[in-house]
Image: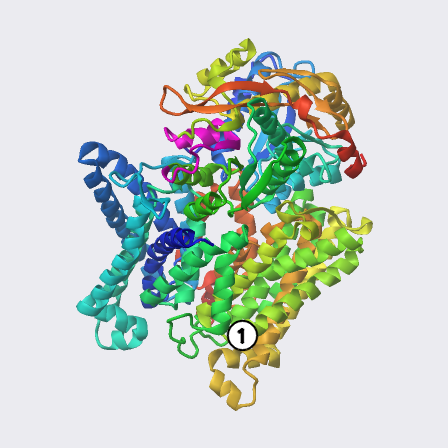
Amino acid sequence: MEPSFLVIQALNGLTSASVLFLASVGLTIIFGVTRIVNFAHGSLHMLGAYVGFTLAEALMATFWAPLGFWAAVALAAVAVGAVGGLIEFLLLRRIYKAPELFQLLLTFGLVLVFQDGVRLIWGPEDILGPRAPGLSSFVEILGYRFPQYDLVLIALGPVTLVLLWLLFRRTRFGVLVRAATEDREMVAALGVDQKRLFTTVFVLGAALAGLSGALQVPRAALNPQMDLDVVVQAFVVTVVGGLGSVTGAFLAAILIGLLNAFGILVFPKITLVLVFLVMAVVLVLRPQGLLGRPEAAGGHGVAVVALMPGGRRVRWGYAALVAVLLALPLVADAYFLKLAIDALVFALFAMSLGFIMGTGGIISFGHAAYFGLGCYGAGLLVHHLELRMELALVAAPIAAALGAALFGALCVRLSGVYRAMLTLAFAQIVYAGAFQWVALTGGDNGLVGLWPAAWASERTAYYYLALALCLAGIALLHRASFAPFGYALRAVRDSVPRAAAIGIDPWRHPWAAFTLAGACAGLAGGVYTFSLGSIDPGVLAIPTSVDALAMTLLGGIQTVLGPVAGAATLTFVQDQVMPLTDYWKLVKGLIIVGLVLVFREGLVGFARDRMEARET
Amino acid sequence: MIRPTCVALAAVLVAAPPALAQEPVRIGELNSYSDLAAFTVPYRQGWRLAVEEINEAGGVLGGRPLEVVSRDDGGTTGDAVRIAEELVSRENVAFLFGTFLSNVGIAVADFAAQREMLFLAAEPLTDALSLEAGNRFTFRMRPSTEMQTAMLVDAAEREGIAAERWAVVAPNYEYGQAAATAFARLADARMADAEIVVEQFPALGRIDAGATIAALDRARPDAIFNALFGGDLAKFVREGSIRGTFEGRRVLSLITGEPEWLYPLGAEVPAGWLVTGYPWAQIEDPDHVAFVEAYRARFDGEAPRLGSLLGYMVGQTIAAMLEEAGSTDTEAMIAALETIEVATPQGPLGFRAIDNQSTMGAWVGRLELGDDGRGRMTDWRYLDGADYLLPEERVRAVRSD
């Protein structure tokens, strides 16, 4: 490789690195202080880009063009900072007392609102903004042309790093932020106004997201889908760098930017999976990221309440529900049964996630991997080996369990969000495999013709099969939660040293739980495959994992059967809202935000609290 | 502008003259109106216009109005198959049409075969739909990826583009890979001394344009074959023109001339690129002019997109099919589609029986900057899809229907 090309490709990599760093640094600051997993960070970036575009169009025509452009960038950052402040003040502040991670569900609702909101205001077509005035051409470097604007971006990364360093080292606000990142309780005990600190930090983080978005106007096409990619990459950079570490995020961005620039020369398809490979390797070697500190013990992000098996009334409730489900085909039409099968599948899928999250304290952002391994386990066997449906349904949970056992062995040793992100990395690697290995999996077109065996091809017959399998899975997970195994899990979740002291192996139990949850998710995937008749990599993709999380959190993480209620609710909402309008995501997002604000313990948690309040 | 589907349906019904008091023919439609609105909304306006015209002219099957039950397919196979089920079992539609994404189209096609329902796949481009993933219940409208690639290579030959060193850049998913594979095969067979010296497959929607451009430049190609579109294309074009990548190099570019992808580029049109597309403003055929006028009159003077034309042609095809079939019996409709010749703004359109692929073609020409400050095609010509159908032996090798 000739040296001049090396230099130019390194500069290309550094440009991407700066862009990545700017898009991520706000997220890491917000997380460090508030512990909020802000899923809407990409939406704020997108909003910054659109607002920056509109302002730039207006101001560049009114003033001297370069002044107008940079004023637009600055104003976009201010505007998005204000939006971030409003989100914190009006919405997030109301649910800080709710279990941690519940805020994630609210920000997920906001993602949907922003996606459709942007489309409503700016339209669905790609928008190509103006080039940066005065920086629209190139400079010649070693015989290659290099965009002037990219040189500015390369410089803006380190400049932002230095400015933030000064802010955090030289101001009282910065001292408080660092103190809160290290120990929130201590800062609160010292009499610092937490609320104000949180709002300010959120405004700062959102403004940085808006800034990064506005800076993209001269080099990217704006569209309402740009948010998801940004937020995922920002999470990766944040975690690889170490949560809350600004310098770490900078190093991580440079690592990823350069690896991508040179990686595509050897593997032209590497972009699909590169960031997740980097994250998996870094987290396996260094569980707290490059510059992060290990999270405090017990920092699993799940507040603890003692779970008790339901009393007689609850058991009667279960029996009545099962009776209704058994009688359903008598009254429901074919479509309603299809909907019910979907709801059952997602109930088991969400329940398996709820089991490891609630009982095991293991957050997974990549639970789709095991659902999808179940789908592909069943689908590939039917497609390539012409296996019978019955055997494929047995193979589905086994395939998923094998995957979960493998990845789980690496995941259980990590903690908190790092562990959650490692599960995401594994899910994305499996996704890339299904996407890229076309000869085996059919690539992104997927596999078709995966219909039930003749005896189960009638909708009612398949409904009863799905009901039997999903209820069996749900019952198994419910039983496991209250078996000695479940109590041992909870002991490990709440205190590793104490659990170890009474002879509970602190790794083997979570590992077994992760594998069990994987198997159940795989069973759900197997049932889903024959209901759908086809599979494609979508079953392994991030939105599937997010759906499972949303169902679990909405139902209530401090409950055993909450995820089942959450799955039923979201399936029903989706079915009702989609035919109403093209902007159904906006409606769905608002419904989720509304549910989060009303039911702060999740649906089932809310119901339980009410029942307990009446009894006492 | 929230437009509930039910309101739209009501509008369609109201538009039907009261003389059509007979029971309507209900047909089901699904597409990605939320996720891919840039392409699908013009498409929906196209079929709406056609349906309104058909109903005003007296409907179908002896005076029955057409009633389209339209749904968002959610952009995923899971949602799409569920919604197809709803349309079939709850809305009692006679057949299905629509879909954009290839994986969604393939999943709905398989559902249609399972339920023995007719499915007219409007927009998916994947060759698989006419080959191994096809079935006798599924008909496809648009020329497939490989057909369009072949049209482009033909046009390149006619222009005398005889480059030796080719660079290929395409999005990393089935469409991009199929285009790259088809191009490699055609280049090998038809262009003497042609060699592909570099390939880049950025992830869809995630191109790192600077690094990708540099990787292409480094291989010093004489010409470039591109299949990027949308946001990736915009970044690629801007970055490439700043860096001089396109200077002195011929570029073949798939679907870039479609207004959907061309207009967002604004004035930054990569002039001289040889593209497939839709030069709607310059087509002088009277049927086409009438379509453009009717479309713009109906939709606030909006410029038609390729999706608009496609949707309109789908509507016309449906009417012609029902006329020929004489009923909504699935077998009769399949037989009708295999025999009809539909008069469309693009000319006569039919379907080949062995793979149910329509003869819809595409326009191929060079890009230039138009007077209105955005791109348009020049020196274009229309290539009939009938001349570019996939070889029969390849179809027969993988299809049994």
Q: Which residue is located at x 33 percent, y 59 percent?
A: A25
Q: What residue type is labelled 1?
A: Val
Colour approach in the figure: rainbow
> Is residue B244 shown in magenta?
yes
Residue B89 seen: no
User: Within the magenta stretch, is there residue B214?
Assistant: no
Q: Give the farthest residue toward the top.
A: B286
- Nearest the camera: A490 or A121? A121
Q: Tell me which residue sits at (47%, 68%) in the image.
A: A282
Q: Nearer the viewer, residue A42 or B49?
A: A42
Q: Nearer the viewer, residue B72 or A474?
A: B72
Give the image location of residue A255, x and y in percent: 41, 62
What segment carries the magenta color? B242-268
Q: Position of residue B153 (x, y in %)?
A: 60, 29
Q: Is residue B336 visible?
A: yes
Judged left or right of residue A553, residue A120 is left
The chain under label 1 reads A
Q: Mark 1 points at which residue?
A: A412
Q: What x and y, as percent, mark residue A336?
A: 65, 45
Q: Residue at x 39, y 78 (%)?
A: A296
